[in-house]
Image (cartoon, grey):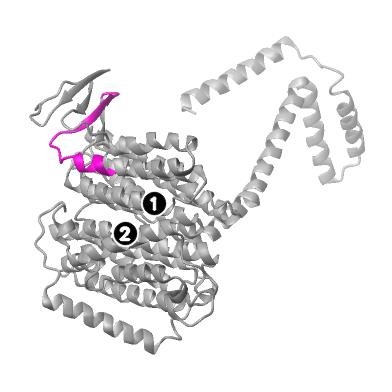
Amino acid sequence: MRLFYHSNQGIANYPEGGVIIDMDTMVVPPVVIFLAGAFLIPFLKGNAKRCYLLLIPFLAIIDLVLIEPQVYNSYVFPFLGMELILLQADKLSLFVGYIFGIIGFLNILYSLNVKDNGQHFSAFWYIGSSLGVVFAGDFFTLLFFWEIMAVSSVCLIWYQKKKESIDAGFRYILMHLFGGSCLLIGIVIHYVTTKSIEISTIEISAIDPNLSILSYIFILIGVGLNTVFIPLHTWLPDAYPRATITGAVFLSVYTTKTGVYVLARTFPGVEAVAYMGGIMALFGVTFALLQNDIRKLLSYHIISQVGYMVAGIGIGTAMGINGGIAHVFNHILYKALLFMCAGAVIHRTGRSNLTELGGLARKMPVTTITFVIAALSISGVVGFNGFISKGMVIEAAHHQPILWLLLEFASIGTFLSFLKVGYYGFFRKREIEVKEAPKVMLIAMSITAFLCVAIGIYPDLIFSILPHTVDYHPFSLGHVIGTSQLFMITGIIFLLGLHLFGPHDRITYDFDYLYRKSAKLFLWFCKNPLMKFASTIDRITIRAAGTILWFSRNPLGAMKHIRYESHLFYLELRKAEHAVEVAIKLEEQKVSHLNKHEQMSIGLAILLIIIILLFYILLYMAGI
């Protein structure tokens, strides 16, 4: 293998057959830092291990800062006549890469007290593979890291080591295997029709529309599963509440956001995708309001908030895509913070149901403050980061009134949901013995909360690095007053109907109920009707094989036996007197069938051979 180097003074055309490496800054694909860095974790202990855990994401952030948007690709590996590209950087991939690196550092800081090396190893590979997807320049490299992401993330569920977690992990991986298979099929068909594996907008080709439609559908399903399209979303609220405390924080960030990123690459401006986003936003918040388990409530809110991102990408305008991608950045911060707060509460109390919580504001003040910041951010209150990006998506949806209404109703439901969590989890009067969260958790939560406020007050922090030029003024008087009025009315509704929004210890049925019932029906069909049918076919086959064997051992005797059987049947029907004699002959024939091999004359044998040959010729001529 040959290595070729280039600099920003650059080469317009690099030689084929070699690996292209950027020598100007000597940056490496961020995925390499995390995947390689994970292997040293088991050999370190104590403070050395903690420092190393923080060093790797810090180096990755520096690496990301050094990467510049390129007009060419680097780390290109030739493979079977194709080019596998590990580092394709533009404003979109760098924007998502920055937040993946920042939150990776904060999540690892939050989980420093975890002693299980396996969890840290899985987290590193999860972060690294997610960055691998973001900077992949071709579909096969993307798929490779897509599958690593699925395997490493399921480990964060299984490390909880409870039966319900193991079962949820298996359901999680089965769903992602289905999604990965659909993505693979779509990519292969796309390559067959376009002769290209470059990541680009998926379109239906006029040359071969049938295959193009298949590719379009399979890739959309594969990406849509990770992006929690309804009804492919059930793996998320099933698995995330059953993950480890720190694992759930990692899970809240990467899988769905890589899905949104790939969706922005492949299906921007698709109207059906925009409306799917609106449905997700309202569906997720509706189910969140019904939850008692705090992490399950937050899981449904991921579906809802990802709906805003999907809607923005589906709208496809510069404002829509900017809004959707900005919401990726902001959502990662406040959603990770919400899972951090929930994890801190569960870590100290051992409880996750709102019916069992309350009175935490006095006992866990820092956790409460950071929760309030995260709740105001996800709700889109003025002065917090969610207000900025959510407003951009809603602004982009103004020309689609149905979609706009779906997103507005989802905003109301989000605020109601977090008023419920805040009141019943933290502020209602209840005596509970609990200590504040550990210091490393508090530090990580405080930094994340600060970023939520900083971006909310000074949105140019992200506007300057968005993929498209921004022409949006979030603090216009009309927008601020309208949003504030909406939240004031929502707050009054909550206070008036406080008893209606109280948590209840009940089961809520989602689409997975239908999937499980369908699976049970399928298993019953396989176990009963299908097995009986198979047993019947088996018996018939064995009997037929036995009959052929019986006939072949003594053909003449078998024909005599058949003649006697037929004659006896006829006589019994006629009730003839000599039927008894035929029955005796039949019994004698049965006894002598295997002991006595009867012979036929040569002429009869030749005649039978000719008849069989003629029969074969007729079958051949008929084409059977």
Is residue 66 magenta-colored? yes
* Crowdedness near tag 2: few (<14), some (14–19) or many (≥20) residues, C-alpha within 10 Å: some
List the single residue furthest toward the top. Answer: 602
Residue picked out by circle 2: 447
Of 567 and 379, the residue lying toward us: 379
Q: Which residue is mark 1?
A: 109
The kind of residue on which mark 1 rests is Leu
**Rendering coords of residue 437 (x, y %):** 46, 63
At 54% from the left and 75% from the top, the residue drawn is 432
Corner quadrant of residue 394: bottom left
SS type, badge 2:
helix
Q: CA distance from mark 1 to mark 2?
A: 10 Å
**Residue 418 located left or right of residue 581:** left
Q: Position of residue 173 (x, y in %)?
A: 48, 47
Span colored in magenta: 61-81
Q: Is residue 289 magenta?
A: no
Q: Does 429 sit above or below residue 327?
A: below
